[in-house]
Amino acid sequence: MSAQAAESPAQSVAPPAEGPAQSAHPLLRRFAVKGVLWRNYLDFAVANVPFYLQPILIWCWTMLFFFLASPARRAVVGNLAIVLPGSSVWINHVRAFRILLNFAWTIAEAASFKMTKAEFTYEIEGREQLEQLAATRGAIVLTAHMGSYDLGAALFAQKFNREIRMVRAPEPDRQTAEHLDTTMRRTGEGAVKIDYNTDGAMLAFDLLSALRRGEIVSIQGDRVIPGVASAAGRMFGHPVAVPSGPFSLALASQVPIYPLFIARAGFRRYRVIVREPITVARSSRARDEEISAAVQIWCSVLEAVVATHWAQWFAFAPPFVRDARA
Amino acid sequence: MHPRYYFALPRLFARLTGASAQRSEQNWLEAAVAGTLVHAVAYIFAARLLLAGRATWQQIGLLLPLALLVWAWWSVIIYANALLIRALRAGGFLRQSADRHLQSILIGVVTTIFACDLVTAGAWTRLVGLAWLGAVALNLAAAAILALMHAEPAR
């Protein structure tokens, strides 16, 4: 890790997203599903619970959150009905439990990496593309809420000695957001910088400058939050809304978009999946057509990866347009 | 790549077969076997303590709440251990070891006490207690042999 990276100025302070969690009483906010209490508990557990007791404890905690986090559970069951057509709603509840269990494992393992510098092994699918990405000057990494994207960014920064700027959706709770900031600073050892996609045009200009300076910007391309520009695509035969920002940025800066996913492959083992870069070249076609074509390529890539790794797609908000309207 | 282990007994076997005896916390099988045994000993101990003498239908009905109780109990024990470790560290002791390794020793002691009770209880629960005590004895012996062989220090 470069000294320059380690001494980089403090990351932007995470703005809390407006929502029910912000309007609740401060004490209740701590205990909310997205409250900071659980993050602190996880840090304590990772530092104190021997690794061989973790599997059963993680299973028990998942069971608790399966009942507590009902909006997330419903969203996952809704997604599964589309991803696995013809599947039974009851079986999809069991699958939703599996997805929440995988989520629990990934956040626990990311916390282990942060707190104890636990060892991880990883295999690479698309080594050639990953090496291209590491060597390229300016690129957008388009990823999804899948596997351990935080851990993946930290490992990438460490392996290739590159800085990454991660664009995240803001957390609904300020303390949780601050906790995540600290986590990413510690996990990425200064090489992973966080931006929150609430800053509107200023953030877009900032990211464009970063890309033109040759930096790598990582954006999650499977969830649209209110107030963020979206583009329409299709996945599994259904319309989806994905953020259009990454594609506009790629067009403006003329950098490639690398689809990259980090799937959990076993106990402290991950698979980095990198696909062929998507280019949004300036041509005689209209800007919207260029973006629309790139969005559809991204949707096809995401669909193929989700079809294989549906148990690790942590889409806890409905991405499909039909569900979003509901 | 050869698998690596955390506990002394598999590390000794690994060393005897020419593989690495270096400690690792990455082995899923080890985590599953040791974790299941620890939880089984604690759960059966709690079941004997709290459910003995009740009607069969009550025992069956209370199995799940008991699991939650044991889970909560582990949380309390781990927190109490953390306070104890902090107090010992404040006194200048055990500053070199990681919290989770010290917790592992304390959890091992508590589980061994429960296992001793299961051994004296008779019936099939004796087997679970004996399995734990046998595993602890073999592991301690393996740790001693590894230490004599100048492998990584035993924990």
Image (tube, grey):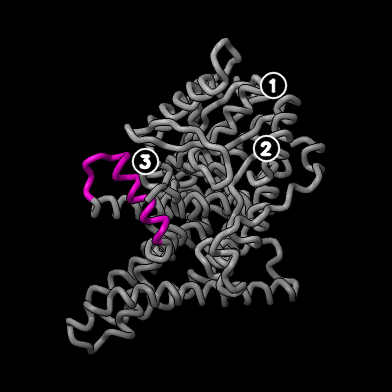
The residue beneath circle 3 is A310
Residue B145 in sight here? yes
In magenta stretch: residue B122? no
- The location of residue A65, given as percent across then percent down, is 42, 63
Residue B148 at x, y = what percent?
57, 54
Q: Nearer the viewer, residue A264 or A25?
A: A25
Q: Residue pushed farthest front? A: A286
Residue drawn at x 78%, y 42% as measured from the top left = A6
Calculate the distance from the C-alpha at mark 1 to the C-alpha at mark 3: 32 Å
- Between the residue at mark 3 and the residue at mark 2, the CA separation in whole angstroms equals 26 Å
Circle 1 residues within 10 Å: few <14, some 14–19, many ≥20: some
Find residue A203 and report its image quarter: top right
Q: Which of disc 3 and disc 1 is earlier in sequence?
A: 1
Identity, as a three-letter code, of the amino acid under mark 1:
Arg
Distance between the Cα atoms at labels 1 and 2?
Answer: 14 Å
Q: Secondary structure at mark 3?
A: helix
Letter of the chain that mark 3 sits on in the rendering: A
Q: Earlier in the sequence, mark 1 or mark 2?
A: 1
**Residue found 69% across the figure and 61% down from its top:** B96
- Name the amino acid, label 2: Arg
Q: Which residues are magenta?
A: A70-88
Report which residue position mark 1 lands on. Answer: A137
Pinpoint residue A58: horizontal percent, then vertical percent: 44, 60
Q: Earlier in the sequence, mark 3 or mark 2?
A: 2
- Compared to residue A66, the image places residue A211 above or below, namely above
Name the main secondary structure of what is drawn in magenta: helix
Q: Which residue is mark 2?
A: A165
Q: Residue furthest bottom?
A: B53
Q: Which residue is depicted at the point 39% across and 41% down?
A: A320
Q: Quadrant of the N terminus of chain A?
A: top right
